[in-house]
Image (cartoon, rainbow, N blue to C red):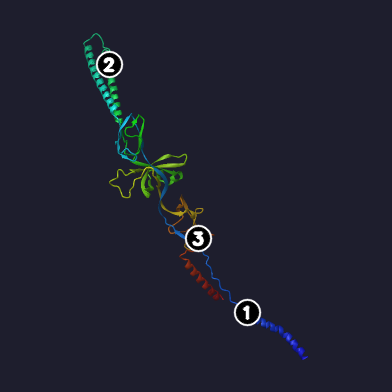
Amino acid sequence: MAESKKGRILQKLLPILILIIGVVFMGMFSGMKQPPAEKEKVDNTPIVAVQEVEVSPLMLEVKSYGVVKPKFETELISQVSGQIVELSDAFVRGGFVKEGELLARIDPSDYEAALIEAQASLATAKAGLEQEKAQAKVAEEEWKRITNASPTELSLRKPQLAQEIARVKAAQAAVLRAERNLERTQVKAPYDAMIEMRNIGLGAFVNMGSRLGKVLGTDVAEIRLPVPDSQLQFLIDQGIAAKVELEGKFSGQPMTWHAHVARSEGVIDGESRMSYLVAEVSDPYLLGLVENIDENTTPLRFGSYVNAKIQGQEIAQATTVPRYLVSDSRVPILNEELKLQYVDITILRQDGAQVVVSHGLNQGDRIITSALDFPVDGMQLALPSNKTDLEEKEAVEEEQEPQIASNEG
């Protein structure tokens, strides 16, 4: 009886004992388990780069290009025939000559003889005219003594006198022609010029109409500047008399020259659909400024390719913005609360990679220049310089939250 009673007690205590042992082991394992490490809070506020807006008076410019050419160029043509007996040392390609300077001489012998012959004919005609005048006067005196008849034109020798006058005029014309032909044996520069080419040599025989050479005027250079018709609105008076800055190279070095628009060609080119303005540069080879030449001044050579900036209208207040930042006439800026804000702008013109803005932006506005993955108007942003300040502000706010909660409890 006692053993059976003891066995029943053990059967009742065994589950309790197992439960106690399980609780003990559970407590031991719980003590051995480490608490999970707190994850460091990540600040996902986007950092952006900005560019401050500078609003100031702006001079609009229209860009163009062109090739420098002389305003005047002349092909020298022989007006008489003969042998070349003299050539000027300056009559070579690239030589500079003054107006009226002798370039070449054609043998004048035949033309000198023709002039002497014409002068002799003129002297004979004048002598005949004087003789006829004397005869006409005698005839007139004789007819005065005759009272019973009237003189005729022929009896007064008026037709003979008119014939002699005509002979004198013809002789005078022959003299002028001979003098002109003799003068044409001297080939002279029509103006201050540079020789582009010479087609003759000493001793060569030329006929009337032969090409002797070509000269380029050095007083004024011209550059035809193509301008899109849509860009003319940014120029004053369609660009007439506007100042032009030319950029090119001389001896491999970048140079700048100043010009002005002299005229507009007044038509739109059928192929390029461009309007053409003609800019002029006085004394491009500096031939008249030798005494006052500046060390940085260089000649503007014919045939040079130049880029041009035509001065246009002046805008009282404007700024330029990179074109890629503009979307639907709006640009993103960073406001005083470091939040994204889109502002509407008025685009005056597009100039390559830039746009000129006349309204919508103020001095000191900060345009966001970095790309945002998901831009939302009003989203919080940060600058690289104030990122640390933002983190400290958030840390202070986190420390204050538990204190507020305990006070509420």
Q: In this view, does 173 lie above or below 149?
A: below
- Gap in Å between the C-alphas at discs 1 and 2? 157 Å
Q: Is residue 153 above or below residue 322?
A: above
- Gap in Å between the C-alphas at discs 2 and 3? 109 Å
Q: Which residue is drawn at 70% across and 83% down?
A: 16
Q: Which residue is nearer to you in this view: 303 or 19?
A: 303
Relative horizontal placement of residue 86, taking residue 14 as reference (left or right): left
Q: Quadrant of residue 274?
A: top left
Q: Which residue is nearer to you in this view: 241 or 40?
A: 40
- Gap in Å between the C-alphas at discs 1 and 3? 53 Å
**Amino acid on which disc 1 is placed:** Phe
**Amino acid on which disc 2 is placed:** Gln
Give whichever of discs 2 and 3 has the lower sequence position. Answer: 2
Residue 365 visible in the current orientation: no
- Residue that carries the numbered disc 2 in the rendered image: 160
Looking at the picture, how far across and down is residue 65, in whole percent?
A: 42, 45
Q: In which quarter of the image is residue 24?
A: bottom right
Disc 1 crowd rating (10 Å Cα; few below 14, some 14-19, many 20+) is few
User: Where is the N terminus found, in terms of image quarters?
Assistant: bottom right
Say what secondary structure mark 2 lies in: helix
Query: Can you tell which of label 1 and label 3 is closer to the viewer?
Result: 1
- Residue that carries the numbered disc 3 in the rendered image: 340
Looking at the picture, how far across and down is residue 62, in whole percent?
A: 42, 47
Residue 29 is labelled as 1
- Are the two marked residues, 1 and 2, in contact with CB atoms closer than 8 angstroms? no
Total numbered labels placed on residues in the image: 3
Disc 2 crowd rating (10 Å Cα; few below 14, some 14-19, many 20+) is some
